[in-house]
Image (cartoon, rainbow, N blue to C red):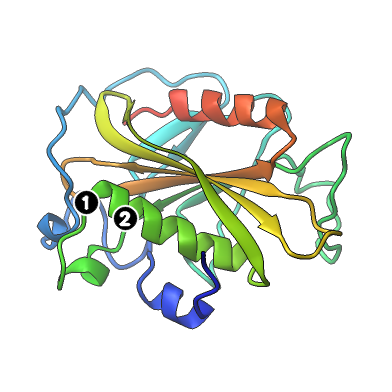
Amino acid sequence: MRRAALGVTLAALIAVGACGPADDKDAEAAKAGSSATPSPTHSARPGEIRDPKAHISYVLPQGWYAKPPDTAVGLYSSVASTVDPKTADPTAKPTADPKNPLGTFMVGVVDTKAYVSKPRTMPEVAETVGRAQLELIYPAKAQDAVRSNEAARIDGRNAWLMDIECTPEDKNVAPFRLRVTVIDTGVVPIYLLSSAPSSATERFGEIESLERSVRF
């Protein structure tokens, strides 16, 4: 269902440096319907991570760690995973550990300039972001299956949730699931991206708690 060239998907993808939710004038091109705007004020919560570019905060579950975003690629405004950056070997490649399955959580801002020529609905934005991310995670041959594709609410905002399961052709690589949530902020949409091995049900419970903790 995929395998488009990585360069093509990145060209239509997302960037966090080009625009922000508070000041982008091209937002109508990617807007998928208006959301009510809840009060943005709240007290700081224990373990809270603030993302100034996406204008949100969230709380990491126990065993999750904030990581510096990759400035070389620049796709995400904040990143977290189950790998402790203080103890991890930066030169080691990630491997499947059944006792400690890898979970990732990333936040980004949709670059509406990529959608100016054609207005996109939130489901279409979720599809584009998800397919491009799959190419980054696993660019080799694989079969992708959409497990859920539905409207959602995040902190009172309209959102769209898409779960995509990827089964690599290489039998040595375990299937994994990518969760994409696009949120209508009323200006520029933001997205939440998370992934974990398909069998790691506890990780997906933690990912859902991360999403529920999002505050604007």
Q: Nearer the viewer, residue 156 or 32?
A: 32
* SS state under label 2: helix
Q: Nearer the viewer, residue 55 or 120?
A: 120
| Left or right of 171 on screen, residue 202 | left
What residue sits 83% from the left and 63% below the top? Answer: 93
Marks 2 & 1, CB-CB < 8 Å contact: yes
**As displayed, is residue 50 above or below residue 139?**
above
Q: Tally the numbered discs.
A: 2
**Within-10-Å neighbours for mark 1: few <14, some 14–19, many 20+:** some
**As displayed, is residue 141 above or below residue 200?**
below
Residue at the spot of label 2: 125
Q: Position of residue 155 (x, y in %)?
A: 32, 24
Amino acid at circle 2: Val
Q: In which quarter of the view is residue 23 placed?
A: bottom left
Quadrant, the C terminus? top left
The disc placed on residue 47 is none
Residue at the spot of label 1: 121
